[in-house]
Amino acid sequence: MAYWLIKSEPSTYSWEQLVKDKQTVWDGVRNYAARNHLKAMKKGDEMFFYHSNEGVEIVGIAKVAREYYPDPTAGDDTWVVVDVKPVRKLKKAVPLAAIKADKRLQDMALVRLGRLSVQPVTEKEWQIVLEMAGE
DNA sequence: GCCAACGTTGGC
DNA sequence: GCCAACGTTGGC
C-alpha cells in the first residue's frame, strides 16, 4: 500500500466538509506531476489531508475510494480524478512548521516541492508524521 | 498583501 | 528546442 498527501484550501474544500460529505470527487487537478500521482493511486491507499493557506497543517487521513477516471469537469481525457473518503481526524494536527523543523522530514515533498498539490509520502515519513500527531 | 518558487506559454 | 515572460500557488 502506498501513501499520499493531498492539499486543499479550507475555504475551497475543508476536512470538515469531507467528513460531512462522507466521500468526494477529487477534481480540479491541472498539474501533470499531481495528475501522475492520482493515476498511481490504488483503492485503499491512505493519504494525509493537508490544509493550505489557512491552518497550514495536516489535519486528517483519507483513503482512495475509487481509482482514477477522467475528470468530469475537464471535458477531455487529459485530467483525472479519484474518489476520496475520510478515515479519521488526527489526534493532533501536524503543522508545516513542525515538519520543516524535523530533520527526518527534510526530504518530504511538502518541504521540497511546496506547491505540488498531490504528492507521495514514504512509509517512513508517514510513521513519523503519525507519531507527531500523537498517534 | 507580498513575494519566492515553479509550471506553462509562446516568440524566435 | 531554448528561454523570457507571465500566471498561479501558497507560505509568511
Image (cartoon, coloured by chain):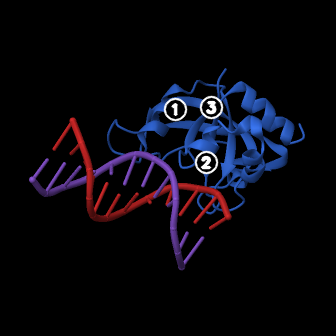
Chain colours: A blue, B purple, C red
Left or right of A130, for residue A74 = left
| Image quadrant where residue A80 sits | top left
Chain ID at mark 3: A
Chain ID at mark 1: A
Residue shown at the point (76%, 39%) measured from the top left: A103
Can you identify the residue that label 3 sits on?
A65
Percent of width and height locating residue A27: 50, 45
Disc on res. A4 = none
Of the image marks 1 and 3, the number of the one nearer the N terminus:
1
Residue shown at the point (62%, 32%) measured from the top left: A64
Depth check, front residue: A69 or A78: A78
SS for dot 2: strand
Can you identify the residue that label 2 sits on?
A7
- Depth check, mark 3 against mark 2: the one in front is 2
SS for dot 3: strand
Residue type indicated by callout 1: His
Residue type indicated by callout 2: Lys
Percent of width and height locating residue A31: 43, 44
Callout 3 crowding tier (Cα within 10 Å): few <14, some 14–19, many ≥20? some
Would you place residue A33 above or below residue A96 in this image?
Answer: above
Depth check, front residue: A2 or A112: A112
Q: Quadrant of the N terminus of chain A?
A: top right
Percent of width and height locating residue A65: 62, 31
Residue A11 appearing in the image:
yes
